[in-house]
Image (cartoon, rainbow, N blue to C red):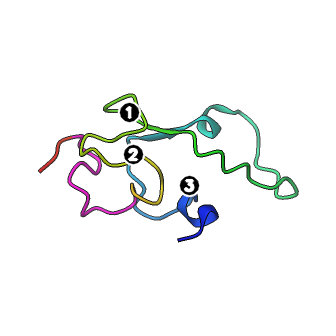
Amino acid sequence: MSEADRFNTSRPNLCSALRWKGQFILAEADPTVPACNDGLFWCLHTQTCIGPDGELAEPGNCCSKSRGCHGTGKCA
């Protein structure tokens, strides 16, 4: 998986607990400005870059409902 795809925040089924700094910028996206893809993501449940299941909290990992903590923060 490419880095651009790994950090794509437009993925379907993205976990609602995933956070990134771009969510807090009150400006329209400018398609002429390349994405920074800085990888600064965190989980709302753990408040760190690691999710409740011990895996990285980033769009490439947090878009699968098969991930035990997806949406709930509880590992099943």
Q: Is residue 11 above or below residue 29?
A: below
Q: Do the numbered discs 3 and 1 sit on residues whose CB atoms are within 8 Å?
A: no
Q: Is residue 15 above or below residue 26?
A: below
Q: Amino acid at mark 3?
A: Thr
Query: Closer to the camera: disc 2 or disc 3?
Result: 3
Q: Quadrant of residue 14?
A: bottom left
Q: Do the numbered discs 2 and 3 sit on residues whose CB atoms are within 8 Å?
A: no
**Residue matched to label 3:** 9
Q: Which circle marks residue 44 in the picture?
A: 1
Left-right relation of 14 to 20: left
- Measured from the top left, where is residue 58 in percent x and y? 47, 50
Q: Is residue 9 above or below residue 53?
A: below
Residue at (66% x, 51% y) in the render? 37
The answer to which of marks 2 and 3 sits earlier in the sequence is 3
Q: Answer whether residue 72 is magenta in the image.
A: yes
The answer to which of marks 1 and 2 sits earlier in the sequence is 2
Q: Tell me how far mark 3 sits from mark 1, CA to CA.
A: 15 Å
Q: Judging from the image, what secondary structure is the residue with disc 1 in?
A: loop
Q: Quadrant of residue 22?
A: top right
Q: Judging from the image, what secondary structure is the residue with disc 3 in?
A: loop
- Measured from the top left, where is residue 50 in percent x and y? 36, 40
Q: Tell me how far mark 2 sits from mark 3, CA to CA.
A: 11 Å
Q: Residues within 10 Å of mark 1 (few under 14, many from 20)?
A: some
Q: Residues within 10 Å of mark 2 (few under 14, many from 20)?
A: few
Q: Do the numbered discs 1 and 2 sit on residues whose CB atoms are within 8 Å?
A: yes
- Measured from the top left, where is residue 27 in percent x and y? 76, 38
Residue nearest the observer in this picture, 24 or 50: 50
Q: Which circle marks residue 16 in the picture?
A: 2
Q: Which residues are magenta?
A: 63-73
Q: Judging from the image, what secondary structure is the residue with disc 2 in?
A: loop
